[in-house]
Image (cartoon, rainbow, N blue to C red):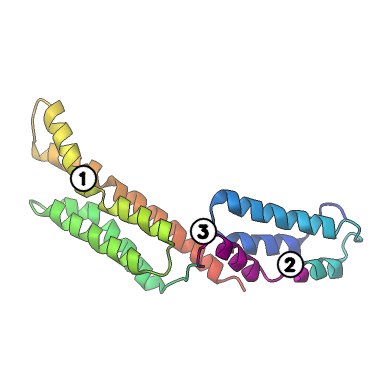
C-alpha cells in the first residue's frame, strides 16, 4: 500500500490522538505521532492498496485514540484536562480581559485592574481544564503587573522630561498590564483544544 498514513481512517485516528495529546510537550507529542505513523506504515506495508479491512484491523490493534493519549499523558505524569462548563471559562477569561478597561477608571483604575487579575488567576487555579504548567504560566502573567507596572512607572519618571503626567502613568499601566492580554489569549486557545479533545470519542 502506498502511503498508508494517507488513508482517511488513519488520518482521522492520528488527528484524534493529536488533539487528545495537545497538552504534551511538543517534542514528546511529535515523537508519539511519528511512532504511530511508523507502526501503521510497517503493519500495512504488504497490504493491498485500498484494503479498508486491513486498515481497520491495524487501528484496532493500536487501541482507541483516547487510550493511546491517556497512556502517553500518564507516562509524562500528566492528567488529561477536563473541559469545564463553557460559561465558567468565559467568565474567567472576561475577568482577566477586564483588566485593560478597568485601567481607564480615574484614580482607582490600577487597583481595580489588579483585583480583576488576582480573581482571574484564582479562577484559573481552581479549574480542572488547564494543566499545572499552564496554571503557573497564567498566574505569572496575570500577576506580573504587581512588579511590571511600578517598574514601568519608574522608568517613565526617570526617562521623560515631563515627569509622571496622567498620560505617562496610564502608558506605564498599559505596559505593566500587557501580559494579562497574553494570558487571556493562551488560556482561550488551551480551553479550545481541551473542548476539541473532549469531543473525540
Chain-order first, disc 3 or disc 1: 3
Q: Nearer the viewer, residue 40 or 7?
A: 40
Magenta extent: 59-79
Q: Is residue 59 above or below residue 39?
A: below
* Rendering quarter of residue 39: bottom right
The residue at 28%/62% (across/down) is 120
Residue at the disc numbered 3? 23
Q: Residues within 10 Å of mark 3 (few under 14, many from 20)?
A: many
The residue tagged with tag 1: helix, strand or loop?
Answer: helix
Find out whether residue 80 is within the magenta segment: no
Question: What separation in Å lies between label 3 and label 1 (alpha carbons)?
Answer: 29 Å
x, y percentage for residue 171?
19, 39
Q: Is residue 49 above or below residue 178?
A: below
Residues under numbered marks 3 and 1 in contact, where contact means CB atoms less than 8 Å apart: no
Chain-order first, disc 2 or disc 3: 3
Side of 126 where 164 appears, left or right: left
The residue at 29%/61% (across/down) is 121
Question: What separation in Å lies between label 2 and label 3 (alpha carbons)?
Answer: 21 Å
Residue at the disc numbered 2? 62
The residue tagged with tag 3: helix, strand or loop?
Answer: loop
Q: Nearer the viewer, residue 35 or 180?
A: 35
Q: Quadrant of the N terminus?
A: bottom right
x, y percentage for residue 105?
13, 53
x, y percentage for residue 89?
37, 67
Q: Is residue 173 visible?
A: no
Residue at the disc numbered 1? 147
Question: What separation in Å lies between label 1 and label 2 (alpha carbons)?
Answer: 50 Å
Amino acid at each position: 500500500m502506498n502511503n498508508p498514513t494517507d488513508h482517511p481512517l488513519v488520518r482521522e485516528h492520528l488527528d484524534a490522538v493529536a488533539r487528545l495529546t495537545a497538552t504534551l510537550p511538543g517534542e514528546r507529542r511529535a515523537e508519539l505521532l511519528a511512532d504511530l505513523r511508523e507502526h501503521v506504515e510497517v503493519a500495512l506495508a504488504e497490504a493491498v492498496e485500498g484494503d479498508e479491512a486491513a486498515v481497520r484491523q491495524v487501528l484496532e490493534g493500536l487501541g482507541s485514540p483516547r487510550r493511546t493519549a491517556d497512556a502517553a499523558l500518564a507516562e509524562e505524569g500528566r492528567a488529561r484536562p477536563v473541559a469545564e462548563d463553557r460559561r465558567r471559562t468565559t467568565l474567567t477569561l472576561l475577568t482577566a480581559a477586564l483588566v485593560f478597561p478597568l485601567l481607564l477608571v480615574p484614580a482607582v483604575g490600577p487597583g481595580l485592574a489588579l483585583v480583576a487579575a488576582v480573581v482571574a488567576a484564582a479562577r484559573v487555579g481552581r479549574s480542572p481544564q488547564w494543566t499545572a504548567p499552564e496554571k503557573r504560566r497564567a498566574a505569572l502573567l496575570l500577576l506580573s503587573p504587581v512588579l511590571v507596572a511600578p517598574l514601568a512607572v519608574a522608568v517613565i519618571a526617570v526617562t521623560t522630561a515631563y515627569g509622571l503626567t496622567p498620560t505617562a502613568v496610564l502608558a506605564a499601566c498599559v505596559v505593566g498590564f500587557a501580559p494579562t492580554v497574553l494570558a487571556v489569549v493562551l488560556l482561550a486557545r488551551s480551553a479550545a483544544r481541551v473542548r476539541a479533545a473532549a469531543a473525540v470519542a
